[in-house]
Amino acid sequence: ELSAAEQGWQILLESIETYQVDTGISDLADQHDHYLYGKTKRIEDHG
């Protein structure tokens, strides 16, 4: 039997899977200020 904490995590993860939305935006987490607040996208140097 799962503990209360484990049950809570299970419910949370099931809810995320149920309600997730494919936005088609691959950089959403990196550029959240742009998508939420309209700020200029940050340019990152990966090299």
Image (spheres, grey):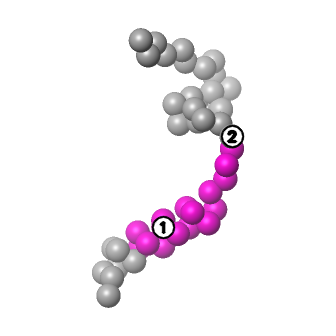
The answer to whether one can see residue 32 in this image is no
Question: Which quarter shows the N terminus?
Answer: bottom left
Q: Residue at x 39, y 77 (%)?
A: 7
Q: Which residue is mark 2?
A: 24
Vertical relation: 43 (above or below) 26: above
Drawn side of residue 20 relative to residue 47, left or right: right
Mark 1 closeness class: few <14, some 14–19, many ≥20 residues within 10 Å: few
**Residue 15 location, x and y as percent?**
56, 67
Identity of the residue drawn at 68% across and 40% down: 24
The answer to whether 14 is drawn above or below residue 25 in the figure is below
- Residue at the far front: name it: 47
Report which quarter residue 31 is drawn in.
top right
Residues 32 and 47: in front is 47
Residue type at the position of mark 2 = Gly
Q: Residue 26 in the image: state x and y as whole percent.
A: 60, 35
Residue nearer the viewer, 28 or 36: 28
Part of the protein shown in magenta: 8-23
The residue identified by callout 1 is: 12
